[in-house]
Amino acid sequence: MQETIEAVVTPDAAEGTQEFITGQIAGLIADYTASGVVETQPRLDYPPYRSSVLRHPTKDLRHADPETIELWAPCFGQRDVHPLEADLTIQHNGEPIGERMVVTGRVVDGEGRPVAGQLVEIWQANAAGRYIHKRDQHPAPIDANFTGVGRCLTGPDGEYRFTTIKPGPYPWKNHHNAWRPAHIHFSLFGTDFTQRMITQMYFPGDPLFALDPIYQSIVDQQARDRLVAIYDHAVTQHEWATGYRWDIVLTGSQRTWMEPEGEDL
């Protein structure tokens, strides 16, 4: 079956079939399971994710001058980030379309200690799975009342909180009929730009998980599960918004997967 699928794949990545990609994913997971080695981070070169080779450093990293970083790096405080920036539903004259929701959680280190004053930024597609971005041209409607970006600072207990709209899935060009699960991108800054980390938060029970090579590039199931938020009825607000909770662990064996910056929206 594997040879039959490979025979129909052309050099154009967009012509590859979902069946072929799913077969690749299944084979890699089987090999990982048989190896007995635990991998908690995504593989840099992951064949089902066609552009993975372009999304990680291939040369030695450049060393940054600490004094230069101190002169030019951002310094975030309460005056730099307004609390209203964390509500993505009030940025325009009207209300955005879609399921209103609250996403909250804590940013902690590997020992469970809170990381206070951490700048957390998010960006996401709208309820139809469309970004306001010139590279996103698939035929889904743009919501004039939803830009899809927000930011906040973590509180004393490392907590963050956003009010937003649940994003929709969207197509991408990894292979034919490829769709990304609904997700929200998270960016976290340390004390300067060299410490920026980026990850994605997913929603429980998404049927596209098994088909998505980005999500599946983390071959360990427990590590993948750490990217999925949980529905929390205590966060849900009566007649207003559903609620999800997702904690971010920055260090240690239970750390949340972080990705290098790249071309994916």
Image: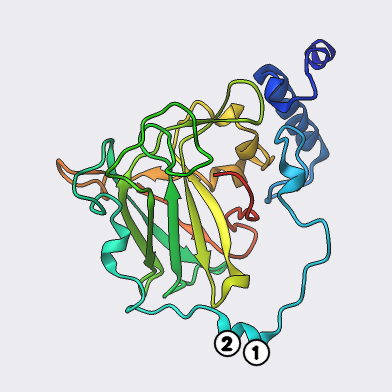
At 70% from the left and 24% from the top, the residue drawn is: 21
Q: Position of residue 111 (x, y in %)?
A: 55, 69
State the image quarter where residue 12 is shown.
top right
Q: Is residue 14 above or below residue 147?
A: above
Q: Position of residue 19 (x, y in %)?
A: 68, 17
Q: Position of residue 96 (x, y in %)?
A: 26, 41
Callout 1: SS = helix
Q: Answer yes or no: do the residues labelled 1 and 2 have beta carbons within 8 Å?
A: yes
Quadrant of the image for the N terminus? top right
The Cα atoms of the two marked residues, 1 and 2, are separated by 6 Å
Estimate how packed mark 1 is, as few (under 14), some (14 to 19) or many (20 or more) residues with alpha carbons within 10 Å. Answer: few
Quadrant of the image for the C terminus? top right
Q: Indicate which disc residue 67 carries.
A: 1
Please indicate, yes or no, whether residue 38 appears anywhere in the rendered image.
no
Callout 2: SS = helix
Q: Position of residue 83 (x, y in %)?
A: 28, 67
At 48% from the left and 72% from the top, the residue drawn is: 113
Which residue in the structure is indicated by mark 2? 71
* 16 or 241: nearer the viewer: 16
Residue 89 horizontal side relative to residue 159, left or right: left
